Image (tube, grey):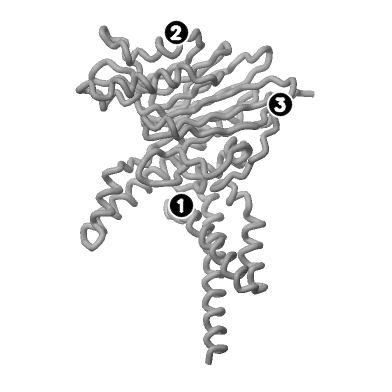
């Protein structure tokens, strides 16, 4: 009887393992599908991290059982390592460049420096701390999303163009998406210690909040084009997550909250699908090596990430360590801020900054080597 039970159990585990492999194959295929053509593909690819984790569980199970069936999850891990490395980077060895031009780039969604949380003055000290942290960071270039500047009389903290750019003698490109009720300017900014000799804005259709900007930098005789992008938000707030958790046990409320989340995710998938293609079309026309920074509001298992990674390398994958989560909110392990780069550059160091937890995003920085051209 025990022998028959073991055979049945083994068969069940094998069938489940095959199911996970099929899930992974379908998910990888869905990464290639534009969400505006088939939005369901966005949800399937969004679930890929779960399939990767389950495949690893099966690997451990067959390993402990000393079964030849370990070849099934192992082959998936080997053949699909590029997708595992999107989730977990293992670049422990740093190759310091010798006698080469280097460029360090900081990317940070600064969440309007918490200015909207400071109407009663309670966040003023935290805002000043965040602005000073950015202004004194040793990076050569800052790419800042949800940037906020207010030059009205009496604004001694939020006059950020002056506090970050003019005070530290940096060249700057600030694209204002809109102005608020208090004449504050909100948009995307690039600050650079190297001269900016050309710059521009990439509009994403009707949306005014999301856009990308670029700046061509003269780096001791070489040129690098740097992009700072902010793609369509997921529009999921911490309160939405809490409402979903609190609705567990209430079937009607849970269905309603689930539909609301799914609707917002679907709108985001579709919008970012269009936006990333506009961005990539502009990148493809660059005559210079490029670095593309930003808040992409999409995980590494998405059409957005897939489209960019086909043409560009990712600094976290090439030079990072660990999970590299950048979302500073109630959903753990989300990496939605990235730096991509083209040929002509090589990333050799990548960092996230969990100590700067004043925004809903964590800052990231990468160091690059400008490779010599023939």
38 versus 318 height, above or below: below
Q: Report, in whole angstroms, how far the alpha carbon at label 3 lies from the one at label 2.
A: 31 Å
Q: Which residue was labeled with disc 1?
A: 46
Q: x%, y% of residue 280?
A: 55, 34
User: What residue do we see at 33% from left, 43% from top?
Assistant: 236
Q: Quadrant of residue 369?
A: top right
Q: x%, y% of residue 222?
A: 68, 16
Dot 1: within a 10 Å radius of its alpha carbon, few (fewer than 14), some, or many (20 or more) residues?
A: many
30 versus 339 height, above or below: below
User: What residue do we see at 50% from left, 34% from top?
Assistant: 352
Q: Report, in whole angstroms, how far the alpha carbon at label 1 lies from the one at label 3.
A: 37 Å
Q: Secondary structure at mark 3?
A: loop
Q: x%, y% of residue 232?
A: 40, 36
366 versus 75 height, above or below: above
318 versus 363 height, above or below: below
Can residue 354 be seen from the camera position used here? yes
Q: x%, y% of residue 331?
A: 38, 46
27 or 237, which is in the foreground? 237
Q: Earlier in the sequence, mark 3 or mark 2?
A: 3
Dot 2: within a 10 Å radius of its alpha carbon, few (fewer than 14), some, or many (20 or more) residues?
A: few
Q: Quadrant of residue 61?
A: bottom right
User: What residue do we see at 23% from left, 56% from top?
Assistant: 247
Residues marked 1 and 3 touching at CB (< 8 Å): no
Q: Which residue was labeled with disc 3?
A: 97
Q: Earlier in the sequence, mark 1 or mark 3?
A: 1
On residue 167, the disc is 2
Q: Secondary structure at mark 2?
A: loop
341 relative to 371 in the view: left or right: left
Nearest to viewer (mark 1 / mark 2): 2
Q: Report, in whole angstroms, how far the alpha carbon at label 1 lies from the one at label 2.
A: 43 Å
């Amino acid at each position: 009887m025990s022998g028959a039970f073991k055979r049945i159990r083994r068969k069940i585990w094998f069938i489940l393992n095959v199911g996970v492999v099929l899930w992974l194959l379908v998910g990888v295929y869905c990464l290639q599908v534009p969400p505006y053509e088939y939005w369901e593909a966005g949800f399937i690819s969004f679930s890929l991290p779960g399939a990767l984790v389950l495949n690893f569980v099966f690997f451990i199970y067959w390993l402990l059982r000393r079964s030849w069936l370990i070849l099934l999850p192992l082959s998936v891990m080997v053949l699909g390592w590029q997708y595992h490395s999107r989730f977990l980077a293992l670049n422990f060895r740093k190759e310091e460049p010798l006698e080469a031009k280097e460029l360090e780039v900081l990317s940070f969604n600064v969440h309007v420096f918490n200015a909207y949380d400071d109407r009663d003055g309670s966040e003023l000290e935290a805002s000043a701390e965040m602005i000073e942290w950015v202004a004194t960071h040793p990076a050569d270039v800052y790419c800042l999303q949800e940037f906020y500047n207010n030059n009205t009389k009496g604004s001694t903290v939020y006059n950020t163009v002056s506090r970050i750019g003019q005070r530290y003698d940096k060249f700057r490109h600030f694209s204002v998406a809109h102005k608020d009720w208090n004449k504050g300017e909100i948009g995307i900014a690039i600050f650079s210690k190297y001269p900016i000799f050309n710059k521009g804005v990439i509009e994403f259709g009707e949306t005014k909040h999301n856009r990308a900007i670029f700046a061509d930098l003269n780096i001791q005789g070489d040129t690098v084009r740097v992009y700072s992008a902010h793609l369509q938000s997921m529009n999921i707030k911490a309160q939405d997550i809490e409402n979903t958790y609190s609705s567990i046990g209430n079937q009607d409320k849970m269905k309603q909250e689930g539909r609301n989340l799914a609707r917002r995710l679907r709108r985001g998938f579709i919008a970012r699908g269009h936006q990333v293609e506009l961005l990539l079309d502009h990148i493809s026309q660059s005559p210079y090596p490029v670095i593309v920074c930003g808040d992409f509001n999409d995980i590494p298992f998405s059409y957005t990430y897939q489209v960019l990674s086909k043409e560009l390398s990712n600094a976290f994958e090439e030079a990072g360590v660990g999970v590299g989560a950048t979302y500073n909110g109630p959903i753990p392990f989300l990496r939605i801020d990235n730096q991509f780069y083209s040929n002509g550059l090589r990333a050799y160091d990548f960092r996230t900054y969990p100590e700067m937890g004043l925004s809903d995003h964590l800052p990231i920085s990468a160091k690059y080597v400008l490779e010599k051209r023939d």
